[in-house]
Amino acid sequence: MGEDKQRPAYEFVDMNTKGEGAVETAFANQVAYCENAGAHITARVVGAIAEVLRSDASNALIERIRHWQGAPLADALPLRVAGGVHSLHLAGTAPELSPIYRGIPADDVGILGAVMRAHEAPLLPWLDGPPQTNEAGRSANFIAAMLWLAEKGLPPRFECLEIGSSAGINLMLDRYRYDLGGVMVGPEDAAMHFAPVWKGTPPPAHAIEIVSTKGCDVAPVDLTDPAQALRLKAYIWPEHTVRFERMEAAIEAAGERKPDLVKMNAADFVEAQLVQPQASGTTRMLMHSIVWQYVPKDQQDRVRAAMEAAGAKATADRPLAWVSVEADRTVHRHMLRVRYWPGGVEDVQLAWSHPHGADVEWIAG
């Protein structure tokens, strides 16, 4: 599969689209998304799988993908399959994949077709749940948002609640060091250091404190379990080698002290946490990154309702904030957005952000 001279077109469609043509569209969109994010190997794998689906190849794995019962884009079906394929490469059980992951020209469709037939049994379970895309680099966005909130007069002591925490890597954000356009935050002896390419003015400089972090996931990952850690690595796009280094650092940090992570869906977690007592002089902050698209609509509605209700009771001494880093699929970029109460301040976009924290374009002034 040669390198395209032009980026493939990205078609904006309803994430919940099902039925005829939905699977093909989902794979085409994922190829375009990966290419635009610099993930050329992942795009190559996803594109080859799409070609296999268009062929006359057939087994239980291929047919389940081809006739996906849900919404393939909302379910991140292409990334489920790609994660499974990558796991075979990482484990060394499918050496024929090596040329693709090394970026060497090869018969991609032939290789992927053979792998999907030979490894049908281990690949099928990868279709059973959404990708776990935990990335420590996204923490820089949350820290920048805290600095902005402190500048707005909210208490600079933060109680952080995260939904879709996966392995809880971003729940350890207080253990990392950040250089945000020259604004330094975090301990010098940090488990990881982040210095995203910063565009625009730096965020406000403030002394902030993270007093607690707690998160949830419907299928939490234990970083101290090698098998679970390998599964998480399989969802890392192979081009992004720094992310593997960060994963190893996160595994070591979790071994020293596990993040506070519970198995629970987003709505149940938010509702349960918002009724807990909030200490005076702290800002309670809900945060999430690249997860909202995976939260079922009924749960999204419950989270919004719970936040609005809690926001109505918020005070200057016990405020509430909602910080998110989610995709705007119309422009292939991710938005850092904030709401906070009291005052019912509507969504404010603070920045455009790379999905893995490589760069931040600060637009909040």
Image: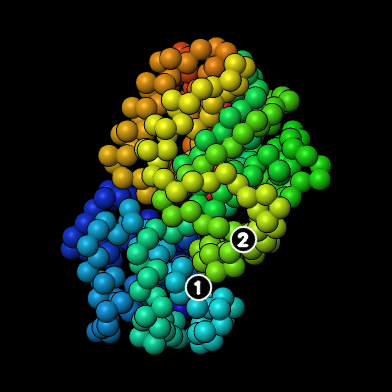
Report the side of 241 relative to 291 (left or right): right
Is the residue under label 1 in contact with that under label 2 (CB below 8 Å)? Answer: no
* Residue 336 vertical placement versus 71 (above, below): above
Q: Which residue occupies 55% across, 12% down?
A: 316
Nearest the eye: 169 or 115: 169
Looking at the rendered structure, the kind of residue marked 2 is: Thr
Please tell me whether mark 2 or mark 1 is closer to you in this view: 2
Q: CA distance from mark 2 to mark 1?
A: 21 Å
Classify mark 2: helix, strand or loop.
loop
Which residue lies most toward the right here?
188
Q: Which residue occupies 52% across, 57% down?
A: 221
Q: Position of residue 344 (x, y in %)?
A: 43, 17
Around disc 2, counting alpha carbons within 10 Å, would you say few (fewer than 14), some (14 to 19), or many (20 or more)?
some
Classify mark 1: helix, strand or loop.
helix
Q: Earlier in the sequence, mark 2 or mark 1?
A: 1
Looking at the rendered structure, the kind of residue marked 1 is: His
Circle 2 residue: 224
Around disc 1, counting alpha carbons within 10 Å, would you say few (fewer than 14), some (14 to 19), or many (20 or more)?
many
Please give the label number shown on residue 328.
Answer: none
* Residue 226 vertical placement versus 101 (above, below): above
Please give the label number shown on residue 86.
Answer: 1
Placement of the C terminus among the 4 image quadrants: top right
Which residue lies most toward the left here?
20
Figure colour scheme: rainbow
* Residue 365 vertical placement versus 180 (above, below): above
Nearest the eye: 276 or 129: 276
Q: Position of residue 174 (x, y in %)?
A: 68, 39
Q: Quadrant of residue 130?
A: bottom left
Q: Position of residue 59 (x, y in %)?
A: 27, 83
